[in-house]
Image (cartoon, grey):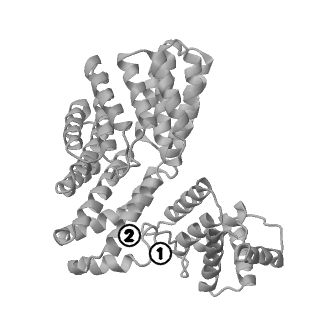
């Protein structure tokens, strides 16, 4: 039997024993969770007990989908009944055990997203901070010298977890989850702890940047501006590619807020300068891609093509050891190619780039970007004089924009709908309008 499966089985057994449950007690707890969720398992305690025993046996089996859901509900709360989903929690241990037993990453991502939704429904803002982290934050507030790598690792892990839920969990919920980390960073920086712990600046810059984006998505532009200022200050002494990331995020928000294209262009130029001086090729690629998009929007053909060439040059290189390895890819760049073709090229070429990018952006984390790309693909169809086919695409975009709450996706949808104005009296355009009104 695979060693990983045995480790997964041992973890399930350890979790059960830590709750003081026998096999039969675990079976009863699972059935009680099913009742709480309004589900009918349709089996006896003895039958569920046999399943629990198989999961922990010398030749363990993976719990089925329904049992994975019920186990997530059991171990997503601590022994006091409070939601606890962060590092060191029983829930995290369960996810690790299920992965070792063969659960797929998509299934586990769905379970995490579901539990995050339930936790925020219950008003829990600290659910992603593991049980060992919360007392460390309290201690560090009064004694900055007590800041430890364990604490910083926990805060950074929470930021990463929230970031990974974009596309699966609405932005307003994610903002609730991230608020405790932002508050902790504010307090710790206020004590001067970053002078002794350089990593605090890195954690804070990442937390503030993500929080600023979430504030923008939830239409709080004032908070977004303040958080970007804090992110820029925290990134001042970090490697320059990190400062470039802050500039790029802020530029995108500026483009779609009251700040406008002029501010966005200045921020992108600053991002390009920092990226060129940094050690992350993928950050340089992304900065040049944004530079190309801004040039294309201004109708500047040659600068657009120059920036795209630089972006492809960095994207196609070996990225072993890149400090920002997962931040950008050829699939993302194809989306930028499409936008540039839309403004200074051919709509047919733009459509093909968008179609390829949308097909490749399949991960839950990429759902917002996929919606934006597909909406732009519909705009390309309009310019190709295929408006009804464009409307067909936009119906799906409306549903995903509604589920994620993405502000940029909604703005792009309105632009695409404006392109359909010449066909406003057609029944299929009226159907699209009805869908937009009911969903958004």
Q: Is residue 104 above or below residue 98?
A: above
Can residue 300 be spotted in the picture?
no
Q: Which residue is mark 1?
A: 88
Q: Nearer the viewer, residue 364 or 322?
A: 322
| 199, above or below 420, in the image | below
Residue at left offset 58%, top offset 22%: 430
How dense is the environment of label 2, judged by Cα within 10 Å: few (below 14), some, or many (20 and up)? many
The residue at 23%/38% (across/down) is 272
Instruction: Please state the horizontal and vertical placement of residue 107, each as a whole percent of the image.
Output: 62, 56
- The quadrant of the image that shows the N terminus is bottom right
Instruction: Name the foreground residue: 151 vs 325.
Output: 325
User: Which corner quadrant of the image does residue 408 belong to?
Assistant: top left
Residue 353 can be seen in this image? yes
**Judging from the image, what secondary structure is the residue with disc 1 in?**
loop
Left or right: where 111 falls relative to 186: right
- Mark before the other along the chain sequence, 1 or 2: 1
Instruction: Pick whichever, 357 or 405, lies toward us.
Output: 357
Separation (CA) of disc 1 from disc 2: 9 Å
Residue name at image x 23 percent, y 49 percent: 243
Identify the element where label 2 is drawn: helix
Q: Quadrant of residue 427?
A: top right
In the rendered view, tell whether residue 397 sits above or below residue 5: above
Q: Left or right of 331: which side holds 266?
A: left
Looking at the image, which residue is at 72% across and 70% down? 35
Tag 1 near tag 2, CB within 8 Å: yes
Question: Residue 27 location, x and y as percent?
Answer: 74, 78
Label total for image: 2
Residue 154 numbered tag = 2
**Residue 64 location (% of width, % of height):** 73, 63
The circle on residue 422 is none
Q: Residues within 10 Å of mark 1 (few under 14, many from 20)?
A: some
């Amino acid at each position: 039997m695979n060693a990983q499966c045995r480790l997964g089985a041992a973890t399930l057994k350890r979790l059960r024993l830590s709750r003081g449950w026998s096999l039969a007690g675990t079976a009863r707890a699972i059935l009680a969770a099913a009742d709480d969720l309004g589900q009918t398992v349709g089996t006896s305690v003895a039958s569920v007990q046999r399943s629990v025993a198989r999961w922990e046996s010398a030749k363990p089996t993976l719990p089925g989908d329904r049992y994975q859901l019920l186990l997530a509900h059991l171990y997503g709360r601590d022994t006091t009944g409070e939601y606890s989903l962060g590092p060191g929690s029983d829930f995290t241990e369960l996810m690790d055990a299920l992965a070792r037993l063969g659960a797929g990453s998509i299934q586990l991502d769905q379970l995490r997203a579901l539990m995050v939704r339930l936790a925020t429904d219950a008003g829990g803002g600290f659910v992603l901070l593991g049980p060992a982290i919360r007392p460390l934050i309290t201690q560090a507030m009064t004694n900055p010298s007590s800041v430890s790598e364990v604490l910083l690792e926990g805060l950074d892990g929470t930021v990463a977890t929230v970031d990974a839920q974009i596309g699966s969990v609405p932005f307003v919920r994610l903002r609730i989850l991230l608020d405790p980390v932002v508050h902790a960073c504010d307090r710790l920086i206020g004590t001067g702890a970053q002078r002794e712990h350089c990593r605090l600046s890195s954690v804070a810059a990442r937390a503030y940047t993500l929080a600023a984006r979430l504030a923008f998505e939830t239409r709080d532009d004032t908070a977004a501006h303040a958080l970007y200022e804090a992110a820029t200050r925290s990134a001042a002494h970090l490697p320059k590619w990190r400062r470039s990331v802050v500039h790029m995020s802020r530029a995108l928000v500026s483009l779609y807020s009251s700040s406008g294209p002029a501010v966005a262009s200045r921020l992108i130029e600053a991002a390009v300068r920092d990226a060129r001086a940094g050690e992350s090729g993928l950050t340089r690629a992304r900065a040049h891609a944004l530079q190309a998009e801004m040039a294309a929007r201004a109708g500047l053909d040659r600068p657009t093509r120059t920036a795209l060439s630089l972006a492809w040059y960095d994207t196609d290189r070996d990225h072993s050891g890149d400090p920002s390895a997962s931040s950008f890819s050829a699939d993302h760049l194809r989306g930028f190619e499409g936008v540039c073709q839309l403004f200074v090229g051919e709509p047919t070429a733009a459509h093909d780039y968008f179609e390829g990018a949308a097909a490749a952006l399949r991960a839950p984390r990429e759902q917002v970007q996929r919606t934006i790309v597909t909406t732009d693909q519909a705009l390309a169809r309009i310019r190709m004089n295929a408006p009804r086919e464009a409307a067909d695409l936009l119906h799906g975009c409306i549903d995903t924009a509604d589920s994620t709450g993405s502000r940029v996706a909604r703005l792009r949808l309105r632009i695409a709908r404006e392109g359909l104005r010449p066909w406003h009296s057609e029944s299929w355009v009226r159907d699209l309008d009805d869908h937009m009104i009911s969903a958004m």
